[in-house]
Each structure stands twice: as structure tokens, then as C-alpha cells.
Image (spheres, rainbow, N blue to C red):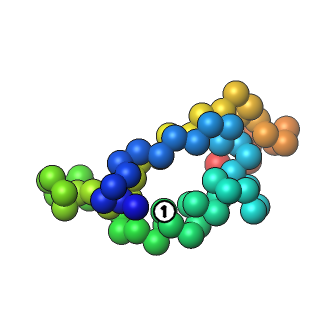
Amino acid sequence: MGMDIGLIIFDEAHHAVDNDPYNRIMQEFYHKLPPRDPSLTGIARMRRPMIMGLTASPIFGGNVNKAFR
């Protein structure tokens, strides 16, 4: 995954909880890859892809403190 994919974009990222496909991707693939290492260059640096989560609902569930954690 990290060698072929450099960026994963999740739209409606606030749904990435419980058994949601976004959450499953993170648990089953993303977190099993070695972390990115900014000190490396080229292909050696490509490990975990970067993640961009987009949402129009940052206060999912109405709990502001939980949303910012």
C-alpha cells in the first residue's frame, strides 16, 4: 500500500468509526505499515501514505471536546 499509494483522501471522514470501511482501511492496512520517516529520501521514504480527512461536520455527535481529540 505505501509503495503504490502516497495519499488517501477520505470524504465524510466523520463517519470513520466502528465498522465503517474507512475505519477498516485504517485498522487493517494503514496502521500495519511502518511510519513515514522524513529523514529518508526517495522510495525508502514511502511507507504509510499521508491521510487527508474531509468533513463538513466536525462536531459529530455534538461533543466538541471529543471532536477535537
Determine the residue located farthest toward the front in the rendered image.
4
Q: Residues within 10 Å of mark 1 (few under 14, many from 20)?
A: many
Location of residue 58 in the rendering, given as x and y in whole percent from the top left corner:
70, 34
Circle count: 1
Judge whether 55 appears above or below 50 on screen. above
On the question of residue 36 being in view, the answer is no
User: Is residue 25 left or right of 59 when viewed as pictured?
Assistant: left
Residue at the location (14% across, 53% down)?
Answer: 41
Residue at the location (68% across, 56% down)?
Answer: 21
Residue at the location (64% across, 53% down)?
Answer: 22
Judge whether 21 appears above or below 7 on screen. below
User: Is residue 55 left or right of 29 when viewed as pictured?
Assistant: right
| Residue that label 1 marks | 30
Res 2 → quadrant: bottom left
User: Is residue 38 left or right of 8 when viewed as pictured?
Assistant: left
Quadrant occupied by the N terminus: bottom left
Identify which amino acid the numbered label 1 is placed on: Tyr
Between residues 2 and 69, which one lies in front from this camera angle?
2
User: Is residue 47 left or right of 51 when viewed as pictured?
Assistant: left
Location of residue 66 in the rendering, given as x and y in whole percent from the top left corner:
73, 47
Location of residue 11 in the rendering, given as x and y in whole percent from the top left corner:
62, 37
On the question of residue 41 being in view, the answer is yes
Residue at the location (75% across, 62% down)?
Answer: 19
Determine the residue located farthest toward the right in the rendered image.
62
Determine the residue located farthest toward the left in the rendered image.
41
Location of residue 38 in the rendering, given as x and y in whole percent from the top left corner:
23, 52
Judge whether 38 appears above or below 33 on screen. above
Element class at badge 1:
helix
